[in-house]
Amino acid sequence: MSNEEITLTAGDAEATVQPGNGGRIGGLRVGGTELLRQGERFGCFPMVPWCGRIRDGRFRDGATVHQMPLNAAPNAIHGTARDGAWSTARVTTDEAVITYDLVDPWPYSGRVTQVIALAPDALTLTMSVETYESSFPAQIGWHPWFNRVVDGAAVQLGFSAAWQEERGDDHLPTGNRLDPRPGPWDDCFGMPDGVDVTLTWPGRLELKVTSPEQWVVVYDEQEAAVCVEPQTGPPNGLNTLPRLVTPLEPLEATTTWSWRRL
């Protein structure tokens, strides 16, 4: 099937999927109100096969050191799949399945599958990375850009993290864990019981970002949008906390955004 834009509907919710633009969610409208920042770099893009920055763009797999392009010099950021065209495998009224085959500059062969499922009050994103050849380290995450202001109301962020990763001058975790600090943030937080972050646009909408994963990056330093990014490990995690994709065991992750009107 083609990689043309897909529109999913459920109740008064509508989601736009853009396989040809990095497999991203281009928009999420509830009752006609757009919740995601618009623009080809925004919406919500998949972070795979790694999340956030890799220090100096280098990661080690056994004795081999791999170099990724420094697209956020001096580091590499947010994986390769957001720069590629995905293929559409299946579409119904309220669900789309899209796939992406890992290619250069990523040094391993594998397939990424993303399922986007819309309900009247929730959007669930599920992603897997699988290989039939050599095993490799990987991460999965999502990078949504939620509009800071919706219907004239400015968002409020609410979450309770067990710790905050100390951030070095290079924006990468130092390995030290701190008590969570007040924002603004471009920071990774640990949530051992699963990611649970609430975005509230007072008098308009409450949206919860949840995931069984234990890591979330919160980024709210831009005026137009705030980002709540569940992921399978911290930034630079290919080096510090790698998750292995093997022929027997894919890497899988999921996140759900659920909302209610206020």
Image (tube, grey):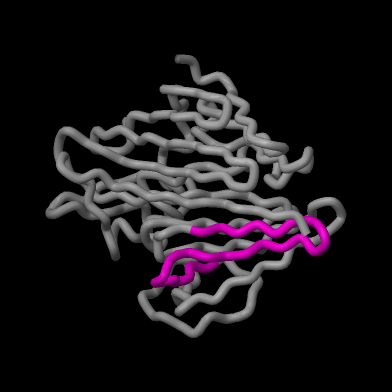
Residue 122: give x, y in percent of width and height: 59, 47
Q: Report the magenta stretch's main SS.
A: strand
Horizontal side of residue 182 vs 239, given as left or right: right
Horizontal side of residue 183 vs 152, given as left or right: left
Q: Is residue 117 magenta?
A: no
Q: Magenta stretch?
A: 187-210
Q: Residue at x 46, y 79 (%)?
A: 162
Residue 205 quadrant = bottom right
Quadrant for the C terminus in the image? bottom right
- Residue 190, relative to residue 37: is it above or below? below
Q: Residue at x 67, y 35 (%)?
A: 14
Residue 11: give x, y in percent of width and height: 68, 36
Kindly give the residue lying farthest to the top in the view shown: 1
- Total numbered labels placed on residues in the image: 0
Q: Nearer the viewer, residue 185 or 23?
A: 23
Residue 69 visible to the viewer: no
Quadrant for the N terminus in the image? top left
Q: Nearer the viewer, residue 26 or 84?
A: 26
Horizontal side of residue 6 vs 65, given as left or right: right
Q: Residue at x 52, y 24 (%)?
A: 92
Kindly give the residue lying farthest to the right in the view shown: 152
- Residue 161, relative to residue 11: is it above or below? below
Q: Is residue 190 magenta?
A: yes
Residue 227: give x, y in percent of width and height: 60, 56
Residue 111: give x, y in percent of width and height: 31, 33
Q: Residue at x 16, y 39 (%)?
A: 247
Residue 2 visible to the viewer: yes
